[in-house]
Amino acid sequence: MKVAITGGAGFIGSNLTYYLSEERPDWKITILDALTYAGNLETIEPLLGKINFIKLDIADREAVTNIFATEKFDLVFHLAAESHVDRSILSGEPFVRTNVLGTQNLLDASRAHGVGKFVHVSTDEVYGALGPTGRFVESTPLDPTSPYAASKAASDLMALAVSKTFGFDVVVTRCTNNYGPYHFPEKFIPLFITNALEDKQLPLYGDGNQIRSWLHVKDHARALLMVAERGRKGEVYNIGGMEEAELPNRLVAEMICERLNKPKSLIKYVEDRLAHDRRYAIDYTKINRELGWKPEVHFQKGLPETVEWYVNNKAWWTRVKSGAYLEFYEKNYRNRGL
Ligand code: NAD
Ligand code: TYD
């Protein structure tokens, strides 16, 4: 079985690659990744004897076609994306290029060169924001509020349309917020852990009462394998966290401070994100009923373990938090009173 993982040098893609190389040791895995600011070869270095790595920009149509014609993959996990909401507010163009055009290129090349199944990895953010009650189901109308979420919604629809039009075996997954090792420190949890470790302020947007549903990245990887092996063609599967992991940002920030023995006064309330989604929560009944998946890692255990991982892997995140990262940090937080 020849398997391509796009975005395999990023957070979820690398965790998925580690998981699959344990669970399916006979699979021949190739990571396809452009190594943007979010991709890091160091993350997957221990696997490099076992798996292949090809540097590829998925928005480069000719390069995508050539690689798919040569490699003849059986299965594609598509995770490569521009993934940060705040960056998409600063500029939407890279999001359309990679998330929309890149996905189209991969779908076309996959269909043309014998791919048997295409797992399109998406996000619950395509559904927009929830009020205080209710959960996203797969039929909830798409109502994205950020350029990131809009570009993911567009790519979901292209993927589903290719399945409907040509009968191509595409499955779309929509997962809630992940956390765990190798999470890029521009995102909330790793940013707050690493800033706290450096005794820097923790910039909490707005009133800090926005609710996110947290899922350990390993639970996500397990769901993606199930979907690849048993998910039904043309279907969407929501993937979500436990009810106990639906928490306001303020509380998560405090848990991080407590775990690291840092004062909560590091938390600084700053100007809110534009169109900040108030609440996400997922109904994962469908994947539970059809494939038997449910989240297994409790946040009370997974968060401290993740904090420990950042404590023990300082070299990884200090290298990442340099150069272009600092430019983005300055742009995003300068006018927020940080
Ligand atoms: P990430 O930003 O950590 O990694 C993205 C990877 O894609 C990087 O390795 C980067 O180099 C690569 N990439 C970016 N542009 C590329 C291009 N043009 N060509 C090839 N490679 C390119 O993202 P992540 O958090 O690991 O997210 C992976 C996927 O999962 C995304 O599609 C995202 O929308 C989705 N998702 C993420 C979350 C989350 O909580 N992080 C939740 C649900 C869904
Ligand atoms: P993020 O990790 O960017 O994920 P998403 O926006 O995709 O859910 O943000 C998670 C939550 O944390 C979100 O409600 C925004 C908030 N947040 C802050 O309060 N401060 C920050 O500096 C960041 C990056 C996020």
Image: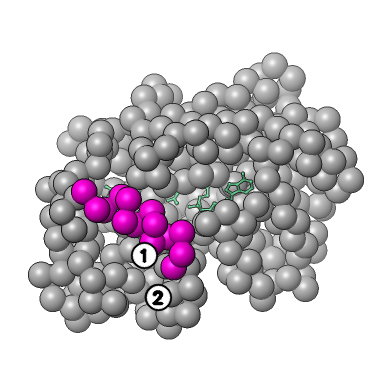
For mark 2, what is the residue? 310
Instruction: Let me know if residue 114 is in the magenta part.
Output: no
Residue 234, image x, y percentages: 62, 27
Residue marked by disc 1: 190
Circle 2 crowding by C-alpha within 10 Å: few under 14, some 14–19, many from 20: many
Residue placed at 33% from the left, 71% from the top?
194
Magenta-colored span = 322-335
Magenta: main secondary structure? helix
**Looking at the image, which is closer to me, 96 or 335?**
335
As drawn, 218 above or below 162: below
**Position in image of residue 31 (x %, y %):** 70, 56
- The reply to whether residue 328 is visible in this rendering is yes
Q: Is mark 1 within 8 Å of ligand 2?
A: no
- Residue extending furthest toward the right: 70
Task: Give the residue displayed 42% in from the left and 55% down from the top.
Answer: 178
- In percent of width and height, residue 329 lies at 34, 57
